[in-house]
Structure formats: C-alpha cells, structure tokens
Image (cartoon, rainbow, N blue to C red):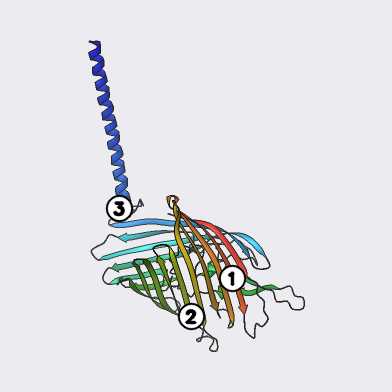
Amino acid sequence: MRKVISSAAIIVGVLMASQVQAADQSVEARIEAIEKKLEGTNGGNFIKAGKDKIDVTLYGQVNKAVMFATDGENDDVLFVDNDASSTRIGIKAKSKSMGDLSAGAQFEAEFQGNDSNKVTMAAPTYSASFAKRQMKVYVDHKKVGKLTVGHGSTATDGIAELDLSGTDLSGSSHIKISGESFLFWDNTNTAGDPGAYSSVKVGNVFNHLDGGRKDMVRYDSPELVGLTLSASSADTNYSDIALTYHKKLDPMEIKAGVGYAYEGAGADPRNRMSGSASVLFNFGLNFTVAAGNAEFDDTIPSRDDASYTYFKVGYKFDAFSFGTTAVSVDYGMYDDFKAEGDEGTVYGLQLVQKVKDINTEFYLGYRNMSLDRDSVTYANVDMEDIQTTMAGARFKF
C-alpha cells in the first residue's frame, strides 16, 4: 500500500513540475513575442506620440575626443567635442503613410563643450555652445517629391562631403573641423623679431565650399535611377541647387554630387560651386575626391577665384570579429581663399574602428596643415605648419 501511495505521489509531483515548467516557458514566450513586436514597430524606441497614427523616434549621440596640437611655437592637449559629428539629441515624428503621402517634423539640437573647431592655442579658453540643427516640417509624396520648411540643411549641405571610406569621423574634405580657429604662427625674422601669431586662421585658408543649415524652404525630387535633384531658398538672399547620385552596382557602391550656391547680403564669396564623389569596392578599397570653386568678382573685381581639390584613398576590412576597421590617407590643396597667392596644403591619416555590440566607434586622426603666401604683399612671409592629432569615441543611440 505504501509503495502505491509513494508511486502516486511521485507521479503527481512530476505532473505539477511539468505544468510549472510549461507555464514558465509560456510566460517567457509571451515576453519574447511582446519584445519582438515592440522592436519591429519602432526599432526598440518606446516613445509614444501624443496623437494616433504618428511614429516618434528619439535619437542622439555623444562624441568626445582628446586633441594634441602644435603650431610650431606652442603645443597643447585639448579635450574637445569632435565637430565632425557633434554631440546632439533629436526627435523625429512621422505620420503613418496615407498611400503615397506622408508628413513629418524633426527637432535636433547640439550641445558642445570645447568644440574642436573653436579651440585655440593663442588664447586658450573653455567654450560651450548650444545650437539648433534641425527645426522643420515636411510633406512627402512618393511621386511628386518632398517639400520642407524650417531650419535645416540647404540643398548643398554635405555636397562636398560624400565619403564612403568610413573614416570621415577622423578626417574628410571638411579640414577645419579639427582646429578651424587655430592661428598660423608667423615666423618671419625681421631685425631679430622672434615672430608672432598672424591674423590668419585655419578656417580662412581651408574652405571646402559646402552648404550649411539655415531657415529655408527646400524641395527634393523623387529618386530616379539613383539621381535626386534638390533646391532651396533661405535667409540672407541665399539660394542653391544640387544633383546627387547614389547607387550600388556590383562590384561597387557609388556616391556623387555637385551643387551651386549664391549668397548676397555681403557674403564673400557670393558664388560657389562644389562637389564630391566616392567609390567603395566590395573588397574594401575606396577612393574619394572633392573639388570646388568660389568667385570673388562681386566684391573684389580684380581678385582671382579661389579653388581646392581633395583626394582620399581608403580601405575597409574585418580585422576583428567585433566590427569593421577603416583606414585612409588624404591630401588637399586649397588656393587663394584668404588672399590671392595663398597656397594651403593638407595631408593626414585616419583610422576608425567600429564595435558593433556596444554601438561605438573609436577613431584616430592626424593632420598637417601648411600655408605658403606667394604674393608681392606677403613676400618672404614664413608661416609654421599646424599639426593636430585627435583620438576619441562616438556613441550613438
């Protein structure tokens, strides 16, 4: 009898344990299903819109670096916010599609401490800035195009920075992101004069003639065989137009664009044309080129046009299982931007390492910037080179 009761107790215990385990598995399955559903509906971003049929996304990034700089007279270690891709936070809202028609808005602000383009060695100070980047609304029709109104990128914003190398965090045609406010040291020796800081900034010499962000109205056409036409009109009597191309064609990916911009109200230069192109092959080799021309005829009739050309060669590969490694070298020539006869030369090395599991990019970049003044006005002027090395990390969310 005892054996029967004991056997029955064992059977009941096993049944109860199996039911509990089944219940646990059922709960886990339900939790996983809910998580997948949430991730699928909004990319894991759990912000709820105040109105129905609106998708809202919160996003942002923090990008901090340590910069070592030397100008031939002084050197310093600076803790900066990398202006190549500044620290920022934003919100995007978009109506759920009503056929081919949708609408949306975007608000984005940047917060920078010691901007890499504002730090100096001539008069070192800590700087902090808060600025609007995007504050706009748009209406988008798949067959007609997209109309945007507000503060945001003009048609030529980014036209000179099309770059598939994966190293633009540490170096691109936008030379002045790393030390725009640094002054060139004039080492001209006159009667024993040891030299002094000139009035020429890095940003005066190296200008890639890219567009920017303004209060504007902008139109973007629907994409056709990889081509998109954009045009905008903004404050300060500004207008621009751009044509871009982006396509993946085995065995390569191509990005290219060209744009023209005019700005009145005392702008100098007023007429600008610039563009860039980048090719990335499937095996990792990539080439990037950018160029531009600026006319000063409206303000200084006798002055030559300013121009630049920029080249980069890079390679992307999977050296580690945790993310892609990208390396590159670049070289650029920037002529006549500050004054006629100025020749600015730059070269650099770049490295960016992605770590997928922690969604972070680590980078290292080196720059050497030189200025030769080849004119009667600045005869025998000897400007020292400026060198910067910047290492940092960007975390995006």
Q: Nearer the viewer, residue 319 or 350?
A: 319
- How packed mark 3 is, by other alpha carbons closer than 10 Å (few <14, some 14-19, many 20 or more), is few
Amino acid marked by disc 3: Thr
At a point 75% along the width and 75% down the height, the residue shown is: 193
Q: Amino acid at mark 1?
A: Met
The residue pinned by badge 2 equals 293
Which type of secondary structure does the marked residue at label 2 adopt? strand
Spatial separation of the CA atoms under disc 1 and disc 3: 48 Å
First reached walking from the N terminus: tag 2 or tag 1:
2
Disc sitting over residue 369 in the figure: 1
x and y, in percent, of residue 365 in the image: 54, 62
Mark 1 or mark 3, earlier in chain: 3
Say which mark, if any, is on residue 49. Answer: none
Residue found 25% across the figure and 11% down from its top:
2
Q: How many marks?
A: 3
Q: Helix, strand, or loop for circle 3?
A: helix
The residue singled out by tag 3 in the image is 41
Residue 248 position, x and y percent, is 34, 66
